[in-house]
Image (spheres, rainbow, N blue to C red):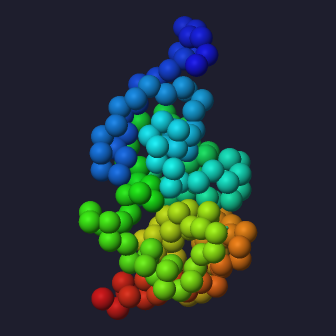
């Protein structure tokens, strides 16, 4: 931690609701939400790919909207609600329908991008941007997959969106 100065305190208190649980901690004013989630809260499901806003591996939801946690300061989450991939499954550990759809549609290989893809996919469906394959490709274009599992990812998101629309 850097030394304090009157203008720039070394650490700031924040209160964040993470996956439904209230968390209070002191963060460096420059600390990213990604680093706080992974290094301070041991929520390592959210991945650090590029750390520069270019890969989508760090996607989480902030007050229900997707954000890149590597480009979000932890202090920006103060008083807000964060959902990570660890908060997506049911209380008994049962997979969320989108997680199950990723399994069913073979939408992953190494799995490194998968948490970010699932978080972005959930948002894509909630935003109403999963109406057809092209739309899903466009609205998930910020989430890269080095393994090229894109056809399965699109199919999984479309399957859940279709089910939601039907039911
Ligand atoms: Fe955040 Fe790549 S780690 S976009
Ligand atoms: Fe390997 Fe997407 S499954 S990077």
Question: Which quadrant of the figure contains the C terminus?
Answer: bottom left
Q: Is residue 159 visible?
A: yes
Residue 49 percent coordinates (x, y): 67, 54
13 w.r.t. 69: above or below: above
Count of all numbered marks drawn on residues in the image: 0
Give x and y (percent) for residue 43: 46, 48
Residue 79 in sight here = no
Residue furthest to the bottom: 166
Horizontal arrangement in the rendering, residue 17 relative to residue 144 (left or right)? left
Picture residue at 50% right of the left edge, 68% below the top:
118
Looking at the image, is 3 positioned above or below residue 18?
A: above
Which image quarter is the N terminus in? top right
Q: Residue furthest left?
A: 92
Q: Which of these two is toward me, 79 or 147?
A: 147
Please indicate whether residue 91 sits to the left or right of residue 88 in the image. Answer: left
Q: To which quarter of the image does residue 72 belong?
A: top right
Q: Residue furthest top?
A: 6
State the residue at coordinates (63%, 74%): 109
Residue 127 in percent (x, y) is at: 46, 70
Of 67 and 35, the residue lying toward us: 35
Where is residue 4 drawn, in percent x and y? 56, 11
- Residue at image position (38%, 43%) is 80
């Amino acid at each position: 931690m850097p030394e304090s100065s009157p203008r720039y305190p070394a650490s700031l208190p924040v209160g964040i609701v993470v996956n439904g649980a209230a968390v209070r901690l002191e963060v460096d004013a420059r600390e990213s939400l990604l680093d706080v989630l992974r290094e301070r809260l041991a929520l390592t499901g959210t991945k650090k790919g590029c750390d520069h806003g270019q890969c989508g591996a760090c996607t989480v939801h902030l007050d229900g909207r997707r954000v890149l946690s590597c480009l979000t300061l932890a202090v920006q989450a103060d008083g807000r609600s964060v959902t990570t991939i660890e908060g997506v499954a049911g209380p008994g550990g049962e997979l969320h329908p989108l997680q199950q759809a990723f399994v069913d549609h073979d939408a992953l290989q190494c799995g490194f991008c998968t948490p970010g893809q699932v978080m972005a996919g959930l948002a894509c469906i909630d935003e109403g941007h999963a109406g057809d394959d092209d739309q899903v490709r466009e609205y998930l274009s910020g989430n890269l997959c080095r393994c090229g599992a894109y056809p399965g990812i699109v199919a999984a998101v479309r399957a859940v969106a279709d089910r939601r629309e039907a039911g």
